Image: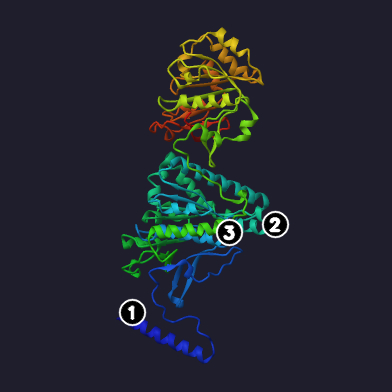
Amino acid sequence: QQEEDEITDLKVLVDAVNEANERLGIPEQHSPWLPALPDSVELDALPAPQGAGPLPPAPYGIEDLPAQQARRTVAIDFADFGHLIVGGAPRSGRSQMLRTIAASLARTHSIADLHLFGIDCGNGALNALTRLPHCGAVVSRNQTERAVRLIGRLKQELGRRQELLAADGFADIAEQRAAASDPEQKLPYTVVLLDRWEGWLPTLGEINHGDLTDEIYGLLREGASVGIHLVITGDRSVLTGRISTLTEDKFAFRLPDRSDFSMISLNARNIPEDIEPGRMFRAESGLETQIAVLTDDLSGAAQAAAVAAIGEAATERDAAVPRSLRPFRVDVLPSRLGFEEAWEMRDVQAQEGSKLWALVGVGGDELMGFGPDLADGIPAFIIGGPAKSGRSTVLKSMALTYLQQGVRLVIAAPRPSPMRDLAGREGVLQVFTEDDIDEDEVHDLLKQASPDEPIAVLVDDAEMLTNCDAGDEFKAIARRGAERGWALVLAGDEEEVASGFSGWQVEAKKARRGVALSPQDPSAGDLIGIRLNRSSVGDQVQPGKGLLHLGDSEPFAVTTPLA
């Protein structure tokens, strides 16, 4: 009864103020008694927000201001935006908020000014963002390798931007963009959308004992000043713990336990009993905000279609933006592909520069065919892996590459192998099938080589030939092959090949180049010159999946082609 009396008194006071304003000729700015916020509001119906920066703000909702008897559009304005953390129960509007924010940003800003990335640890609601030309990647929680690549690229970009700003004496990205005379020199704002923190923590968040989670925290601490912003949704776990201390801008949708609103400094007694989907409350002030939807049809399919429509319009609008100003990509590795398909994706410049370049697999953030150039450095390469991991297939892919480029081959296959099928092919000088190889025969074959007409020796199941008679000839290839037009590629079991302290295989290992297929033990990294941690090994053997190292200390995942 006391609250009702206070409301009545307030109404009388407001009516008196409005009457006085009318007599003085002061126009009424808004209705003194606004109805409740609507259960849904379309993005197109939001009033244009007022921005303080050079870029227009991107609206995503409407906020109720009861003390002023007014409403205002809530928008992301990079003039003062840092990060945003939003907690809520399932089906409270978390994923829709991320879709609305992404679509509004894409509609408002050019690709040259804004890049988007998504991490979907839920049911795939963010997949629709791939239709936006601003979006470099949407990674799901079961794409471990791809998530590592994305977070790694973001971390590199953070460091690059920090160095760039420090070198020119800029305090933040706003100063850099204001000072840049050439539009192509302006750093773009990067927004990372992470859906369902509770899905991140037990999956991607556990990789390498929480390394990716630590890197997310690093982006939250240091990213905003250089233009890398995060919007993270989750259940109550996102509103508590370490992550909640890294930004002040927090909201909460409906929570299963009303007492959880205390985590954003709100009294549960001041929160309505029934909270509609899409309605959230700002930390500390408790202001209500209704998230906008993209179309009046609230189904997920309709909202995804609206995102696609915005993406088509943005693609047409920004068609002239050069590739250098577009977001970096983090492509999905194909599960399997054929040799011809992989050959079309090869690095043409690397392949044309040397006859001893060979295709191993397809990988990288922007999918491309990669392989070693054995005319450079120690001319040796190791293919290691457990049984049924695809070692012989990789060796055959390299053989087909060499044959297409006019490289002659000497093949050793002491066990049944696809490499034996190459016997009789033009350019194949000899196929050895015994478990020992005569040194003189190999010596006579290698005498035919020259830098212009190289010969590659390809050995399958190399662990069977560790002590073969031709070992000294193979060792000579690893030591002096570069100037004589020789190259050596060996494939074998990761636990046995190149073992011990001496021999021709140990000499080949000094090249520190190779591919580890489905590694089962950290020691497999020694074969190719890298260090593997335990979280990178021991998974189920997947034929054609491996880590390629080309000697630059930056291994990356590849899919090897079927040959």
Of marks 1 and 3, which one's residue comes earlier in the chain? 1
Q: Is residue 357 left or right of residue 285?
A: right
Residue named by callout 1 = 3
Q: Please tell me in which quadrant of the rendered image residue 175 appears.
A: bottom right
Q: Secondary structure at mark 1?
A: helix
Q: For the residue carrying disc 3, how many other residues have a C-alpha within 10 Å: few (<14), some (14-19), or many (20+)?
A: few
Of marks 3 and 2, which one's residue comes earlier in the chain? 2
Q: Please tell me in which quadrant of the rendered image residue 536 appears.
A: top left
Q: For the residue carrying disc 2, how many other residues have a C-alpha within 10 Å: few (<14), some (14-19), or many (20+)?
A: few
Residue named by callout 3 = 317
Of marks 2 and 1, which one's residue comes earlier in the chain? 1
Residue 13, position as x, y percentages in the image: 42, 86
Amino acid type shown at disc 2: Ser
Mark toward the viewer: 2 or 1: 2
Residue named by callout 2 = 181
C-alpha span from label 1 to label 3: 54 Å
Look at the numbered discs 3 and 2 and tell me whether their residues touch, using CB distance below 8 Å. Answer: no
Q: Is residue 87 visible?
A: no
Residue 156, position as x, y percentages in the image: 56, 44
Q: Secondary structure at mark 2?
A: loop
Judge by depth and name the residue closer to the eye, 341 or 259: 341
> Residue at 33% of width from left, 81% of height from top?
4
Judge by depth and name the residue closer to the eye, 255 or 222: 255
Q: Is residue 484 left or right of residue 15?
A: right
C-alpha span from label 3 to label 2: 23 Å
The label shown at residue 330 is: none
Residue 462, position as x, y percentages in the image: 48, 18
Q: Residue farthest to the bottom?
A: 23
Placement of 332 over or under 522, stated as above or below: below
Judge by depth and name the residue closer to the eye, 227 or 458: 458
Amino acid type shown at disc 1: Glu
